[in-house]
Amino acid sequence: MRSRWLPASTALAVLSIAAIAACGSGSSGAAGAAGTSGAAGEAGATGVPGAAGASGEAGARGPAGAAGEAGATIVVGISDTAAQGLSISPVPVDLTGLNQDQIELVGNGSYLVNAASDCASCHTGTAGFLAGGVSFGPVTSRNLTPDSTTGMTLTEPQFIVSMRTGADFSGVPDGGTPTASLLVMPWDALRWASTYDLASIWAYLKVIPPVTNAVAADTKPVAPPTPFPADGPGGAPLPPEFTTSGDAEAPVPDPGFTLRGLALNPLDVTPPADPATQSQFGRGCYLVTAISDCSGCHTNSGGTYLTGGQVFATPAPLEPVVHTVRAAAADLVGAHNGFFTNPDVDYATFLTLITEGIHAEDNPPEPLAYPMPWQYFRNMTSDDLQAIYVYVNAVASAGLASLSTDGVIPNPALYCDSTISCPPGSTCSSASGGECLAQGACSTDLDCDVCQVCVGASASAPTDGGATDGAAAFGSCTALSSVAPDGGTSPLAQCVAEGYPAFH
Ligand code: HEC
Ligand code: HEC
């Protein structure tokens, strides 16, 4: 499993209006109310942006808003998922001239981009929604908008090849064959998505507003694309997507891509026998593996599936906003320390975590640290959140022997400065901006916050920025060193400013 990269950090000064459109997580309560009245009035038509407002808490109310704005004729008959997708798009989508199937496709694409996945985390910078320009060291996220000069020029087939094999078409002449591979883009998860879902994402990207934003060329090493395998990550053959009846367009019925999900199951976990639960398991595995890339953050490089520990540094401009300097992805399924293995965790706990961004299982409840992208995931339908719960819970309950090696994931390291103080019992490492260090409370590094080291019973800041300190415990503090020190902008900064509750 490849690890997720973080955006390089820079000044937060550029954080501005675009952020609000991009994240759509702002005043969710108020926005929900606005959405409802938008549907009532014709403001809805102008108010495609109104739909974005509804993205917050008002998941269930979203579809109603979309119906209002798009005109009853369009939305009638599309799936709940597509309606949800249309209602949560943070930007207006141009549905002019599209037939019902195409609208369904666009709605499904918006759902995948804005709820089940977090494309905007990396592709939305200061230029606008999905307009790219975010630096990740040697590469910069691309402009995915349909701007004719600086936007995405991939055809649908090229887009699908790119996601399935990592092929980078940038700079490849028309008709040429890519020789380089995308580096930071999590194509290794997206590759498992169904052709229909990939086509949906492409269709959505074609109808969002074009934004002119030329993006810097990459300086990454050239690695060839990876051919798409016939089998899923666990070795099971992938089910056919289309019939062999001669009608190439006729899909094999696989609602929610649950059969595909069952084939993608990367572990030797037996799906539940009961058909209804089995299809939830399949859908959940499909989302977790192919769309939401939970594993990209929750599996350490070389580590055990979904047992966490990958460390993420908070970009410097965000530290005073979210009050953390770094956090480690949680252990989701470990036999001893997995979130879903904990008997106190039920679906309600998970739902609160995803929809409100708090650890409801803790007393008092702590916020969910950056960069867990719950502001996107909370836009998922409750069917999909339940499916994810069923799948990850089944993995946790399987109690695979190899999962018994999971360790404790330490708490996020908290930010402090002259105005943001530390919790009682800890001191700030630097008045000009540092991290909180618990005093007299540790006997090993594991008792400290993530990547900190225990020196004489007190926590001490990592001496090399976390590159190696504490690494023995998790093997993951090295992740910090992959964060480039400069360049680019942090799109997450924007979402964070609106959505993440601050610690202490
Ligand atoms: C972790 C950050 C990250 C996430 C999440 C991410 N991308 Fe990317 N993406 C990138 C970067 C960076 C590049 C450019 C180059 C590279 O990776 O080598 C890129 C490249 C691309 C390209 C190639 C564009 C071109 O013109 O050739 C497409 C298409 C794309 N991303 C779509 C998506 C979609 C759709 C999603 C969500 C489902 C997504 N990305 C999520 C970082 C990300
Ligand atoms: C961009 C990286 C990223 C992605 C993608 C991601 N997570 Fe997370 N997640 C994190 C981090 C970091 C934490 C730790 C947050 C904290 O310490 O408060 C976390 C925490 C959690 C927790 C809280 C667990 C606990 O012990 O309290 C759950 C549950 C969770 N994630 C589930 C998921 C699921 C399910 C997916 C996919 C649908 C997912 N995450 C995708 C980074 C990510």
Image (cartoon, helix red, strand yellow):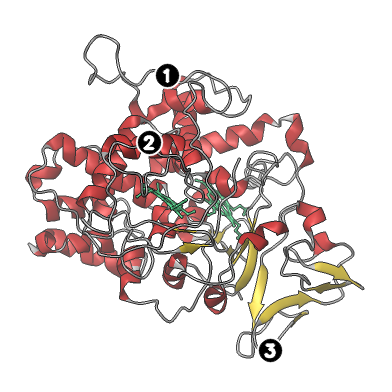
Q: Where the C terminus falls, by quadrant? A: bottom right
Percent coordinates x, y for residue 263 in the rendering: 50, 23
The mark that comes first in sequence, 2 or 1, is 2
For residue 392, above or below residue 369: above
Residue at x-position 58% and y-position 29%: 266
Badge 3 marks a residue whose secondary structure is loop
State how far apart marks 2 and 1 are (Cα): 28 Å
- Amino acid type of disc 1? Pro
Farthest residue to the top: give it: 245
Q: Where the N terminus falls, by quadrant? A: top right
Which residue in the structure is indicated by mark 2? 177
- Amino acid type of disc 3? Ala
Q: Are marks 2 and 1 in contact (CB under 8 Å)?
A: no
In which quadrant of the rendered view does residue 145 lie? bottom left
- Amino acid type of disc 2? Thr
In which quadrant of the rendered view does residue 100 lie? top left
Percent coordinates x, y for residue 467 in the rendering: 73, 63
State how far apart marks 3 and 1 are (Cα): 58 Å
The mark that comes first in sequence, 3 or 2, is 2
Q: Which of the two residues, 428 or 8, is positioned nearer the viewer here?
A: 8
Which residue in the structure is indicated by mark 3? 431
Q: Which of the two residues, 329 or 53, is positioned nearer the viewer here?
A: 329
